[in-house]
Image: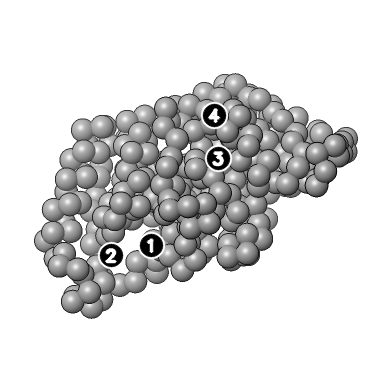
Amino acid sequence: MFRKMMVCTDLTPASFSLIGCAAQLQQIGTKEIVLAHVVESIASAERTLLSQELEAVFRRQKEMLEQRGLDVTAEVLHGLPVSTLDAAAEKHDVGGIVVGSHSKAVIALATLGSVSAALLALTLRPLLLYRVDFVAEGRGEVECGSLFRHVLFPTDFSEAAELGLDYLGKIALEQHGAEITLFHVLPMDEEAEDGRTEEDARYLLEAKKRRLERLGASEVGIELVRGEAADEVIARGKAGLYSLVVMGCQGKGPLKRVLAGSTAEQVTRRIEIPVLLVPGKHHVE
């Protein structure tokens, strides 16, 4: 599931924090990394060489991952970034893609104006988004903290929301000692709950808790609140309590995978911690 991952780097100074974050994937079983950089070109025959400075950065990032004991394949790709990266992920049969994002990029989701936003709409593979803009602004850590220290799993019990549960289980299985919080937001209007009571929600969360504990999670908590789902998730991303959010997202066609205005889209755009988004038809080894 996580054995081979692709890391997309733009070779900017902030991308070094992405490398540090990706190295932590070893904790959940990652052995191989495909380190990819895209030189944007329209014609397939175009081949622009990297400058000596960028070549040195690319080589250094590869070495950083290898020094952690990872098997690294480094590729400079040419083409349109999103389709090229998606094709490379397919070629290497990776279990997921790690990419830097920033608030302005994800706001452009509706027009597919950024690589991270467009990958959200295109790829069928899990996507780990790491907010590199915080590092550029001096608000982030080079090594991105401890990625699996405390995982938040928001769910509304829909089919899309539950897609991330398999990946959460894998994290619990591989990362012994991981703390997980299962989180559900009840609407402010009790009549809008489609017949589900607070008792029903707690029962469903308890069942998931038992499953994760059987897989080795050391501590699984449950939190139920009332409010707006996206706002409540984002607030917890700012509190410093959690290190990662795992969420399932829509999978009904390429351009509907993350719907504008959905909880997943709002969280991705506004939250300050990494987010692992699991699409509808995800890749599982």
Residue type pointed to by label 4: Asp
Disc 2 target residue: 185
Considering only order in the chain, which callout, 4 or 1, is on the residue closer to the N terminus?
A: 4
Q: Residue at x 16, y 48 (%)?
A: 206
Instruction: In the rendered structure, find residue 203 and report the number of the disc placed on it.
Output: none
CA–CA distance between discs 3 and 4?
Answer: 11 Å
Q: Are marks 1 and 2 in contact (CB under 8 Å)?
A: yes
Tell me, for residue 97, which label it has, or none: 3
Compared to residue 49, the image places residue 110 above or below, namely below
Q: Secondary structure at mark 3?
A: strand
- Measured from the top left, where is residue 27 in percent x and y? 44, 31
Percent x, y of residue 15: 67, 45
x%, y% of residue 58? Answer: 75, 34
Would you identify the image quadrant in which residue 187 lies? Answer: bottom left
The Cα–Cα distance between marks 1 and 2, rounded to whole angstroms, is: 9 Å
Label 4 Cα neighbours within 10 Å, binned few <14 / some 14-19 / many ≥20: some
Amino acid type at mark 2: Val
Q: Give the class, few, some or many, for how many residues have Cα within 10 Å of label 1's Cα (few <14, many ≥20).
A: many
Q: Residues within 10 Å of mark 3 (few under 14, many from 20)?
A: many
| Residue 229 lies in quadrant | bottom left
Q: Secondary structure at mark 2?
A: strand
Residue to which mark 4 is pinned: 93
User: Which residue is nearer to you in this view: 163 or 30?
Assistant: 163
Task: Give the Cα separation between the discs numbered 2 and 3.
Answer: 28 Å
Q: Which mark is residue 233?
A: 1
For the residues carrying marks 2 and 3, which lies nearer the camera in this image?
Answer: 3
